[in-house]
Image (cartoon, rainbow, N blue to C red):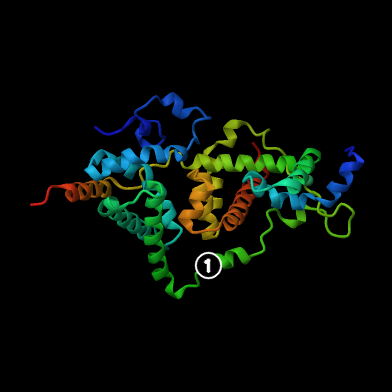
Amino acid sequence: MIVSSVFRRSSRDYRCQQFVEAVTDYLEGAMRGRDRSRFEAHLRHCDGCEHYLAQLRRTIELTGHLGVDDVNALGPEARRQLVGAFRDFHAPRA
Amino acid sequence: MFLPRPLVALPGPALHARGDAAHHSSENQYVTPVASDYVDDQILVASLRRGDEAAFAWLLDRYGASLQRLARSYVATAAAAEEAVQETWVAVITGIDRFEQRASLKTWLYRILINVARSKGVREHRSVPFASLADELDQDEPAVDPTRFVGAGDARAGSWAAPPVPWDEEPERRLLAAETLAVVEAAIATLPPHQARVLRLRDLEGWASPEVCNALDLSETNQRVLLHRARAKVRQALESHFEGSTP
Ligand SMILES: [Zn+2]
């Protein structure tokens, strides 16, 4: 990989091991200024870290798929009772 | 009549009656209702206060499973989690009139659950060492196994020795296979409780960071640390899964 001398220095200071610990700050928008420039500069020149970031994005996406089909944990009986309790609570009192 | 227009647009049980096409397209599957909650809250809260059963049933179906899962991270048994959820619903029924709407209805609901489940958990764990937040944060947990990087003493120290490979070559079908999702679920199940809660609320329920900090009483920074560690572990589990099995 050909790296310009400008980047050689910063990428030497900023290693993959630091990058992987910074991805959440980056994804959360909690990274500013110099930290962000160094992170992005590293990302442009490092395939391993690019793959790591892509994997993490995939991970988040896959986690988001878990909830989709999973409705109605409440059994029908408990559900009926709760709706009944709601009804009773709102029934005009004698 | 219930189901005001904004609510119908939300995913969840209320949506099953609607066009399935939108629901099943992959772009729409993980759209979360977060952004719309404030808009809908006024109508939903007013309906609940009026005693609208359909509104209450909608709430039960929309949040029941998710409350149950979150409760499970505070207590030792599924039965205790169920109890916490039931108590939460009773508190909703009797407390909706006193709900001041300073937070969203959803945040209020989860805060009730968390308080109920936490006090149950504290009672249960009286004799068992309870993993505190400080304990969890104090652990030194690198996002990636240090042996994946070049070791100290080498000019390339800290660079990948065994870099990750792209998953994009995995066919979409395999990425979304039940088997893959089961790996994610199993990884979440082994997370320490604080990490599991943050990950569930953020990535599974799709909450925004301020909502999670608020519901779980976490600082932004601590929330980020917990999320970081949790996601890193789930990624690791997926990587092992993809590498360990042939497509
Ligand atoms: Zn790198």
- Label 1 lies in ligand 1 vicinity (Cβ under 8 Å): no
Residue A54, image x, y percentages: 67, 39
Relative to the observer, which residue lies in front, A94 or A45?
A94
Q: Position of residue B180 (x, y in %)?
A: 56, 41
Using residue A45 as the reference point, say whether residue B209 is left or right of it: left
User: Position of B102 compared to B55: left or right?
Assistant: right
Q: Quadrant of the C terminus of chain B?
A: top right
Is residue B185 shown to the viewer in this render?
no
In this rendering, position of residue B124 left or right of residue B183:
left
The residue labelled by disc 1 is: B131
Q: Position of residue A61 (x, y in %)?
A: 57, 39
B77 vs B18, nearest the viewer: B18
Measuring from the top left, give residue B26's x and y in whole percent: 52, 30
Amino acid type of disc 1?
A: Ala
Chain to which mark 1 belongs:
B
| Neighbour tally class for label 1: few under 14, some 14-19, many 20 plus, Cα within 10 Å | few
Q: Nearer the viewer, residue B102 or B172?
A: B102
- Among the 4 quarters of the image, the one containing residue B125: bottom left
Q: Say which residue appears at 15% left-offset and 47% top-offset.
A: A91
Residue in the picture at 38% in, 45% down:
B63
Quadrant where the image shows the N terminus of chain B: top left
Q: Residue furthest right?
A: A5
Task: In this rendered view, identify the residue nearer to me: B217 or B121.
Answer: B217
Q: How many marks?
A: 1
On the question of residue A61 being in view, the answer is: yes
Q: Secondary structure at mark 1?
A: loop
Report the side of B84 relative to B132 (left or right). Answer: left
Q: Residue furthest bottom?
A: B127
